[in-house]
Image (spheres, helix red, strand yellow):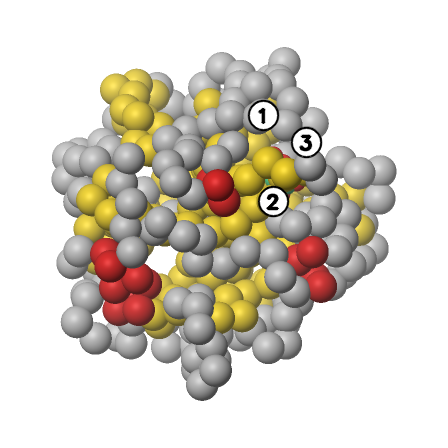
Amino acid sequence: MTVKIIGQSIPNLPWQDKPANEQGVVWRYTKNPVIDWNPFKAAARVYNSAVVPFNGEFVGVFRCDYKNGRPHLHVGHSKDGLDWTFNEEPIDWRDKEGNPFVPSYAYDPRVVCVEGTYYVIWCTDDHGATLGVGMTKDFKKFTRLENAFVPFNRNGVLFPRKINGQFVMLNRPSDSGHTPFGDIFLSHSNDMEYWGKHRHVMGKGGNGWWQGTKIGGGPAPIETSEGWLLIYHGVSGTCNGFVYSLGAALLDIDEPWKVKYRTRDYILTPEKDYETRGFVPNVCFPCTALADADTGRIAIYYGAADTYSALAFTTVDDLVNEIKTNSEVF
Ligand code: BMA
């Protein structure tokens, strides 16, 4: 391993070696999907979800679309990151005084540990879509903070440590519908409640039609010796609707709104049946990337077709090499 991951060891990270005939820099888990339709009584579909290592096992905050179509967040547990059991009840969000502070809907969660606290950021409703923010230490008691922004905003992704003494969150200003535009910005906070010092990070477009309509942050950026490794989603508009693919970029370590390199081509796009067929066809939507500092292995959890949870793998050396040698920054 030549590129160093600055992060934790995850010896039980889910993993499969790269198949000999694989051309891409990212390869799929052969037993995908890891979560199928109707995985527990309340949930029709579980996808676009957040997983973190916890006490030697794994815990997740999962987007669960109910049988009335509305999404809510449920906690799930797994010993190996592959077989999951879900809490039947949604997360019981409370404000700082302990009063119920329940979102009317909640989707696309990301979970990031900063200084021993697990922060959950998701898309919620406040007279329009915006970013809900909460925290937990044990995945039993959850405290909800103020929403980060006024509507409309989606794809809130926290960096896994403070940068120059401040929390930093990627976000994607949007509209009230399915948003036919969108660039990635970042915002700073001293306290996870008041957000400002906004910076544009990167835009849609370039030569790549795969990201010509909009882009949005994916998993929490991974700190490496080459900069922040960001996996994100890029969206192409077709006559048959949006197509969601994965791209990656390297951001400056101290000034992460500066893009050093960015993949010219997608690194994963809908190809398999579980990605091209489902509730919303042609969607690969990453919300988690677990990186093992000892081996450089990276496991990416992504939602497939707004229906399934799937896994794909890469290594930090392979991915950084791909980004640097096939880069287009614009
Ligand atoms: C986005 C979000 C995602 C979803 C995607 C494709 O706007 O709603 O949750 O995966 O659309 O439908």
In the picture, measured across the screen, residue 305 lies left or right of residue 211, that is right
Instruction: Tell me the distance, in whole angstroms, between the alpha carbons under discs 3 and 1.
Output: 18 Å
Q: Residue 117 in the image: state x and y as whole percent.
A: 37, 46
| Label 1 environment density (alpha carbons within 10 Å; few <14, some 14–19, many ≥20) | few
Quarter of the rendered structure image containing ligand 1: top right
Nearest to the eye among marks 2 and 1: give it.
Answer: 2
The three-letter amino acid code for the residue at tag 1 is: Thr
Q: In the picture shown, does residue 107 fall above or below 118?
A: above
Q: In the picture shown, does residue 79 fall above or below 223?
A: below
Residue in view at x 66 percent, y 50 percent = 282
Q: Quadrant of residue 243?
A: top right
| Label 2 environment density (alpha carbons within 10 Å; few <14, some 14–19, many ≥20) | many
In the picture, measured across the screen, residue 165 lies left or right of residue 211, that is left
The three-letter amino acid code for the residue at tag 3 is: Tyr
Sequence-first tag of 3 and 2: 3
Residue in view at x 54 percent, y 56 percent = 269
- Secondary structure beneath disc 1? loop
In the picture, measured across the screen, residue 284 lies left or right of residue 150, that is right
Residue that carries the numbered disc 2 in the rendered image: 243
The three-letter amino acid code for the residue at tag 2 is: Val
Q: Which mark is residue 37?
A: none
Q: Quadrant of residue 258?
A: top left
